[in-house]
Image: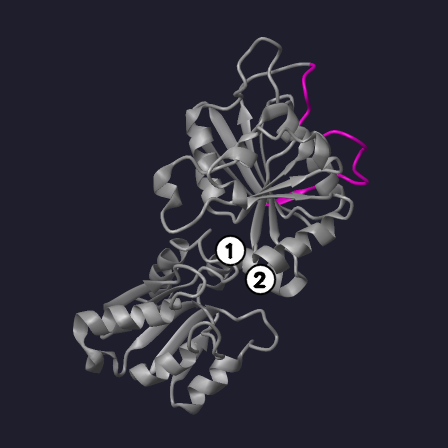
């Protein structure tokens, strides 16, 4: 197998940690020798061993310590070179006798970027970087954005009719999208650290905003639920997110300065990624402020006429364009997922 193919295996490991590792990034690793995988590893949560050390431990358990001498480590992110809640991974790689390290993405922290290269090379280890960089960076985007801006990666999620409405005509059911699309939303919730909504949505819909599929909760807590409102005294005290078993993970924030609010969530809760599930006024305000990075839109094959629009309020100063757009079908619905062109 090529370096890129082995890195693909490390990326598969990294994906297991998406939504579980904040404030750390999801990282995967594989230890290889003589064309054979000796051990796989992924970072499971903050404070737990990093992916490299998990892979080293798996390889040592299966093959013994001597088997790692002369092996290659494939890692989706540059190994950490400083000691924090866990030991430096560069030290672990050196002690294990690894002779070659291949990683995909450089650490975006300017104090760490490239530091591993020098440490490992001084120890006689060959270092190669940039292998499969783009697909690995895709799942690291939230961590990279926080490192570079102090703000989380923000996704706008919406289910709407073909004419851009989020409610059905009076007397019809509440759902626009079908079961397959709603199951995909559960998966999306499991991949983010928090869900952001408005006081208006809480008053109108009484949403729970939880992950309801138990298998998606393995290895993580329910997402933080952030309610933005200037009138917290008017929120219904019997709303599910104030009464359920994870009510301690519900926060009420002022939307007076949206950017400051997001920065506070990063600093205080360690949030890397957040998904908006709210009505048209709040969603549009976030977009006007330039704070949304990605959109996931489920289109139902219906027309609803004069009902509630997905986006409302003042017109945008310019049209918002998507890039890297992907379409996928879920039952009778289809999903658009793309990045805002900034």
Q: In this view, does 282 lie to the left or right of 170?
A: right
- The answer to whether residue 333 is above or below residue 142 is above
Query: Residue farthest to the top?
Result: 171
Residue 195 x %, y %: 57, 42
The answer to whether residue 130 of the structure is visible from this angle is yes
Q: Residue at the spot x=67%, y=61% of the render? A: 149
Q: Quadrant of the N terminus?
A: bottom left
- Is 319 one of the magenta-colored residues? yes
Disc nearer the start of the sequence (1/2): 1
- Is 243 one of the magenta-colored residues? no
- The answer to whether residue 67 is above or below residue 289 is below
Q: In which quarter of the image is residue 30?
A: bottom left
Secondary element at tag 2 = helix
In front: label 1 or label 2: 2
Mark identifier at residue 144: 2
Residue 119 x %, y %: 46, 86
**How many residues crowd mark 2 within 10 Å: few (<14), some (14–19), many (20+)?**
many
Residue 35 x %, y %: 24, 71
**How many residues crowd mark 1 within 10 Å: few (<14), some (14–19), many (20+)?**
few
Q: Mark 1 points at which residue?
A: 138
206 or 164: nearer the viewer? 206
Q: Residue at the spot x=47%, y=57% of the render? A: 135
Q: What stretch is highlighted in magenta?
A: 306-323
Q: Residue at the spot x=46%, y=38% of the render? A: 245
Q: Quadrant of residue 166?
A: top right
Do the residues under discs 1 and 2 have CB atoms within 8 angstroms?
no
Mark identifier at residue 308: none
Secondary element at tag 1 = helix
Label 1 – label 2 distance at C-alpha: 10 Å
252 or 16: nearer the viewer? 252
Colour basis: one colour
């Amino acid at each position: 197998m090529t370096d890129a193919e082995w890195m693909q295996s490390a990326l598969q490991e990294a994906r297991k940690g998406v939504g579980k590792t904040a404030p750390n990034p999801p990282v995967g690793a594989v230890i290889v020798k003589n064309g054979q995988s000796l051990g796989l590893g992924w970072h499971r949560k903050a404070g737990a061993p990093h992916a490299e050390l998990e892979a080293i431990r798996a390889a040592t358990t299966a093959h013994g310590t001597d088997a790692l001498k002369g092996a290659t480590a494939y890692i989706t992110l540059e190994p950490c070179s400083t000691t924090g809640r866990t030991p430096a991974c560069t030290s672990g790689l050196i002690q294990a006798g690894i002779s070659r390290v291949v990683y995909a993405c450089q650490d975006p922290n300017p104090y760490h970027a490239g530091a591993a290269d020098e440490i490992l090379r001084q120890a006689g280890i060959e270092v190669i970087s940039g292998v499969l960089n783009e697909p690995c960076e895709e799942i690291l985007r939230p961590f990279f954005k926080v490192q570079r801006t102090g703000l989380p990666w923000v996704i706008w999620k919406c289910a709407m009719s073909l004419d851009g409405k989020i409610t059905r005509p009076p007397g019809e059911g509440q759902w626009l999208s079908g079961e397959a699309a709603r199951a995909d939303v559960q998966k999306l919730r499991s991949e983010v650290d928090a869900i952001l909504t408005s006081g208006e949505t809480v008053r109108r819909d009484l949403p729970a905003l939880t992950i309801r599929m138990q298998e998606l909760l393995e290895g993580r807590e329910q997402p933080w639920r952030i309610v933005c409102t200037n009138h917290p005294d008017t929120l219904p005290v019997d709303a599910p997110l104030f009464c359920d078993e994870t009510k301690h993970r519900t926060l009420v924030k002022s939307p007076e300065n949206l950017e400051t609010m997001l920065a506070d969530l990063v600093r205080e809760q360690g949030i890397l990624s957040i998904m908006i599930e709210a009505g048209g006024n709040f969603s549009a305000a976030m977009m006007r402020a330039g704070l949304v990075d990605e959109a996931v839109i489920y289109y139902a094959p219906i027309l609803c006429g004069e009902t509630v629009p997905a986006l409302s309020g003042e017109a945008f100063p310019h049209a918002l364009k998507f890039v890297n757009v992907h379409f996928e079908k879920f039952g009778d619905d289809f999903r658009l997922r793309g990045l805002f062109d900034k």
